[in-house]
Amino acid sequence: MEELHRVMSYPKFDFTEEQKERFVNIIMEIATIVGITNKVNIIKDDPDNNVIIESAIVGNVKYVISGDPHLLQLKSFAGVKIVTATEFLME
């Protein structure tokens, strides 16, 4: 959730505080919160993104949908496919 808050504050997204709060509330209603059991250090150029991979592994998800180039560069890790929204919709 910290990474989500950080990314939503990027100027390129231009979200209002109300929009960010509403989005976080929606995510919290549908998300499964997982506890990180194992740390990974696979994304050297942006280590904050490692928590995304860690969460995906613990949550046993099939996909991470992202626009982040550091994540997308991996393509997959530990059985988790990392794709753009467009790629996901084409699967």
Image (spheres, rainbow, N blue to C red):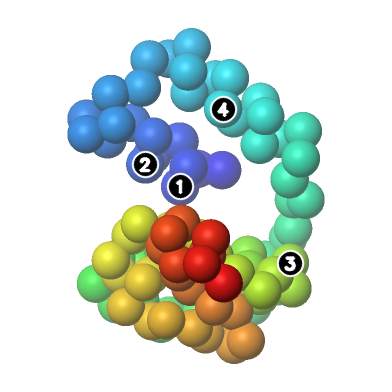
Which marked residue is nearer to the observer: mark 3 or mark 4? Answer: 4
Which marked residue is nearer to the observer: mark 4 or mark 1? Answer: 4
- Among all residues in the image, which is located at the extreme front? 90
Residue at image position (36%, 22%) is 15
Which amino acid type is marked by label 4?
Phe
Numbered tag placed on residue 3 in the rendering: 1
Among numbered discs 4 and 1, the one appearing first in the sequence: 1
What residue does disc 3 label? 59
Which amino acid type is marked by label 2?
Val
What residue does disc 2 label? 7
Q: Please say if the residues under marks 4 and 1 sit with CB atoms less than 8 Å apart.
A: no
Quadrant the N terminus occupies: top right
User: In this image, 25 relative to 46: left or right?
Assistant: right
- Distance from disc 3 to disc 1, alpha carbons, whole Å, reads 17 Å
Numbered tag placed on residue 53 in the rendering: none
- Distance from disc 1 to disc 2, alpha carbons, whole Å, reads 6 Å
Which amino acid type is marked by label 3?
Gly
Q: Please say if the residues under marks 3 and 4 sit with CB atoms less than 8 Å apart.
A: no
